[in-house]
Amino acid sequence: MDTCIIATPLGFTKIEGDFDGICAVTVLNTTESVSKTIPESLQDSVLQLQDYFKGTLQNFNLKLNPKGTEFQKKVWQALTQIPYGKTISYLELSKQLGDVKAIRAVASANGKNPLWIIVPCHRVIGSDGSLTGYAGGLHRKQWLLEHESPFTQQSLF
């Protein structure tokens, strides 16, 4: 398994995977040393994440290989269908997956998403529009949603 650490606007990020696909992208809450060399199997993921943060990439095109249950993988696949700059509620996501009563299981699978940003779990919000929980911290979720927003906030002064 290849690993590298990159710096992003939201902190240091660890990427894990190999030629079978990316299995984990994790934002770290610690200070780390940025990898001096990027393994060949991870180079495309690093470039695409850098382009995402520059605002020049909206859709990732990477081979993914996350570890999880079949249900979790089904939820994660559904997350990849949420368009850039859009949000969906946990209830809406549960309906799309065919079982409105599975909302807690969907929320749990969403929270276990191992592919930060690439599988956009940050685009799932509460039915009332609230940010709700986010493994990377609500400040990061808010930043990501603002980063993807087609509307820019202007300063009054």
Image: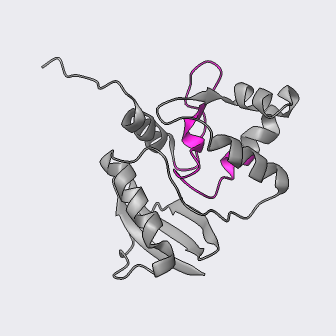
Taking the spot 55% from the left edge, 40% from the top edge, the residue there is 122
Nearer to me, 20 or 144: 20
From the image, give the main secondary structure of the stretch colored magenta.
loop
For residue 67, above or below residue 97: below
Location of residue 114 by image quarter: bottom right
Drawn side of residue 15 relative to residue 35, left or right: right
**Residue 68 seen anywhere in this rendered image of the structure:** yes
Q: So how many labels did they put on this image?
A: 0
Nearer to me, 139 or 109: 109
Taking the spot 39% from the left edge, 50% from the top edge, the residue there is 52
Taking the spot 46% from the left edge, 60% from the top edge, the residue there is 29
Nearer to me, 92 or 129: 92
What range of the chain is rendered magenta?
109-136
Residue 100 point in image, percent of width and height: 84, 26
For residue 156, above or below residue 12: above
Drawn side of residue 134 relative to residue 39, left or right: right
Q: Quadrant of the N terminus?
A: bottom right
Residue 71 point in image, percent of width and height: 83, 49
Residue 108 point in image, percent of width and height: 75, 44
